[in-house]
Image (cartoon, rainbow, N blue to C red):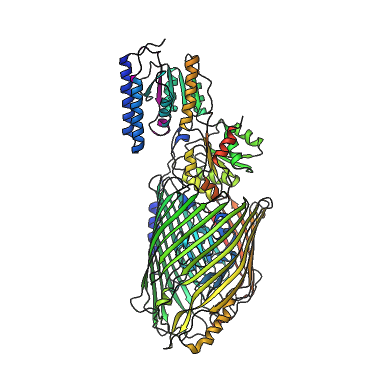
Amino acid sequence: MRHGFDSLAGYATVLMFGSLLAVTPHVIAAEDTQSEQAYLQDLPVVLSASRLSQPISEAPNAMTVIDRDTIHASGYRNIADLFRLVPGMYVGYQDGFSPFVSYHGSTDNYARRMQVLIDGRSVYLPPFGQVDWADIPVHIDDIERIEVIRGPAAASHGANSTQGVINIITRDASAVKGGSFSVNKGEAGISDTVARIGDAGADLDYRLTLGERSDSGYASEILNDSSKTRLANLRTSYRLNASDTIDIQLGYSEGVRGIGTVGRVTEPFRDIRTRSDFEQVEWTRALRQSDEIKLRYYHITRAYADTAMPMIGTDVVLTQRDEIELQHTFAPWDDNRIVWGGGVRTDTLDNPLSFTSPAPTIKQSRVFAHDEWRMTDSAILNIGTMLEDDGIGHRNNSPRLSLNYHLTPLDTVRVGISRAYRTPVAFEEFSNTQYAVGGKQYTSMGGLQPERILSREIGYIGEFPTAGMTLDTRIYSDRLTDLIFLDPNANGTLGFKNLYSFSVRGFESSLRYRWGDGSDIVLNYAHQRMSCSASGSLTLPFLTPLLQAYIDQCPRMVPLDSGSIMLVEQVTDDVALTVSYFNQGTLQLLDALEAQKQMNRVDIRVARSFGKLDKYGGEIALVVQNAFQDNYTEFANTPQKRNLIFDRRTYLIATVHF
Amino acid sequence: MRPSISDEATNHLIKLLKRYISGYSRATFYGPGRCLTRRMLSVALVFLLSCISPLQADPMRITLAISEEGGAYRAFSESLIGKLQPDKYAVKIKRPEDALGGSDLYIAVGMKAASQLAAKDIPTLNVFVPKAGYERLQREYAPRNAPRSAIYLDQPMERQVALLSAALPGVKHVGVLYTAAPTELQSLHHLLGDRNMRLHERVVDKSHPINDALEEVLSESEVLFVLPNSDIYNASTIRNILLTSYRKQIPLVGISQAYVKAGALCAVYTTPEQVATQTLAMIERYAGSGRLPAAQYPGEFEVSVNTQVARSLDLRVKDAEKLRDELRRLP
């Protein structure tokens, strides 16, 4: 085998925990069914505030929901690919295993202006403000739903919820009853396996997933980007009594990834290793009605080791995050519901090559409050803010105000305005590299201001039950200022500075149409226009034309038009078909060498199920991605990647449930 | 018939009542406010009872046989005692296992007390008994001499189905779970059929555990309609049932306020106070005629709606008062 694994310690731990918890008591009260107990018994509060999701017509932001059925119907292997189904969203690949997801443009392959939460855990990590999608120890099949909040939402989702939030909610520990096993084989070296087991008992539920995923990446003649990831994920919830629940999640992943580009001396072919783990404990107390108190603590470790870096040797990055958050939801009056709380987060870095030792530790703290006020039967006012101390010298206030007005029970207009910030990431503020990347060393001068966004929107959500249609549409105007970009220093190194601003104005629309039994089509469309201007000046004035060149290129960060169509059709009782089409106009991220060609991609999935629904049954699915071999190009920040093509991929997934 | 009540008997009653009240206060935790009310109530009762003069007309002797302590049982007995005029009614409170006798009418609260009293064949009015449970008692201990009647705990099926269609108009597929087909199933079939709705049923047993039955019934239904069964729906299982149905965006229609608090969409139920009012009316009929009216469903009821759940499921459910008023207009 090409990739060996040194340590299976992570697996062993999880397996031990798993077996301890596998014994779940199955208590059934043996009461006479004719007794009065059925009527008079006390029941615990189950659907408390944080379990209840908001309908789109009452949410304070534009929101796209990707639910379990959609995820299943897509047949995708990577979480990031799902975001192509969100209007205005861009999914790029730095290489075969490093997707990045941005909303309304991105400077580079670290999409820093969105928060990504998994069950409240922020996986938007230092030092670059990246989301390491491939390393996250959560399997795509363990996701219950994804809420993509399109717009700033710091009042409800915390710091760095700048242009939007990806809020991933994984399946409850009680959702998996029984076991399943799935194998996926196909082109591009695709070889995945996943085993899952779970049970829901009277006081204790658990689910355990063990998975392995590997493929050979893009074109192996250009990039060495094969990857192999193993992951383990355990979720268990224990009910102490009728009102208190403890939810524990543990995750571990380790990966071996190819790195290197043909023809680049600085990037020879070699392997890097990654390791991620997280431990999360959440205590929830249900209070009267749907009020509740929630206390969450988590720890994340992410390690990256490149032991064969040319001329340097070893680059090790160790990132750790600890966060504790308390949140209280209550209804002081019938027509108001308040969520308030606070949290403290500590990010610790160890990265000798990028930072002067010791690397910075950043302590961020925040308080937030949000009120949902039902002013009348048809008007809902959402008002809230977050006050944060970002740990590097700024105090920010991120308010949000929105009014949802039901013109009729089926027609809703939403008007909203909000402000939010993006704290400079550690690399921007503190970098002091001991090596040269592409001939450049980085030395941050510090003193960066947070980036700011002011977002305004008017939306309309209409339901047309007789026609089987739902329409969710909006126009918006977002103004981002003090954006951080590269600034050459006098000593020849590179630093960062607040240099430019941009405005995005646009129109977004999602139309869902259901007909018959099991026919469903979703059409998404986004039209975006961006304008950019310089708002700062370079340290070296003679380089001003360089900045101007970037400003001129900046509006091309977003495609003028983009959209998707996803058709899900239950052809017969046991045959299901999914056809997805993606269109994305030409675009060029700020540090890309040239524009990406227009994308017209079609993905197809055909599945045949057998046996019973969730038990003693299974499914065989054939997935063809980019079925018609559309030669759109990927993000290219090196000349070698200029013609990087995503070739058609076919794979077969077989799943059994028992 | 009734012997005149002596001072001694009055004193005995007062002692009993005192013991009952203080016993209960110790048995369960009560907030200070409630404690004060309780004390005031007991003082008032004791005062009123001490005023009973042996010269007055004999009060009717009533024994309340209560199956369980606390909760709805206590709410009912407190409410009933509050409504019974002390000059007309002398009330004793007993546990079903206590020695019973010497009363004119017995009120059995709950099935345990109902079974004990049915075996004795004495004049009994049963409350907090499901219709099925009461009918079983009637079969097992057919009343020979003494009158017996009941106020059922269940709501008539017509009322429950009316709530279902008023809260969720347009719903066509209704799911139910049971361990053995209940007697109401036939009438539920008909009532749903009349409204163009279809019933989807699954049996829960050893070979067909609750999780499987639930998944199957939810895959066919738009609403899960609770039929009373504490083997299927109890404090241990309700979480799984509610979470599973919520994940599938399927509401649950419950049978008590506790269901609604837990996360059911709505329920129609009768409060202990409303049962007490109906009980009083039946006691008065008995006092006047010496006969108990026929066993009956509760006349008064409330509707409860979990608005947070309704909103989250994007269901536009009328508010609870409106639904209750609609149901009250039913013949």
In the rendered image, the residue lying farthest to the bottom is: A542
Q: How many marks?
A: 0
Seen in the image, is A347 located left or right of residue B309?
A: left
In the image, B79 versus B171, the foreground residue is B79
Residue A283's spot in the image, x, y percent? 39, 53
Seen in the image, is A155 located left or right of residue A184?
A: left
Residue B328's spot in the image, x, y percent? 58, 32
Q: Quadrant of residue A122?
A: bottom left
Residue at 50 percent across and 16 percent down: it is B291
Seen in the image, is A9 located left or right of residue B162?
A: left
Please report the bounds of the magenta region as a residue range: B50-74
> Is residue A334 in the magenta section?
no
- Residue A568 visible? The answer is no
B109 over A488 or under it: above or below: above
In the image, A361 versus B142, the foreground residue is A361
Residue B69's spot in the image, x, y percent? 38, 31
- Residue A379 visible? The answer is yes
Residue A633's spot in the image, x, y percent? 60, 76
A626 over B157 or under it: above or below: below
> Is residue B56 in the magenta section?
yes
Q: Quadrant of residue A642?
A: bottom right
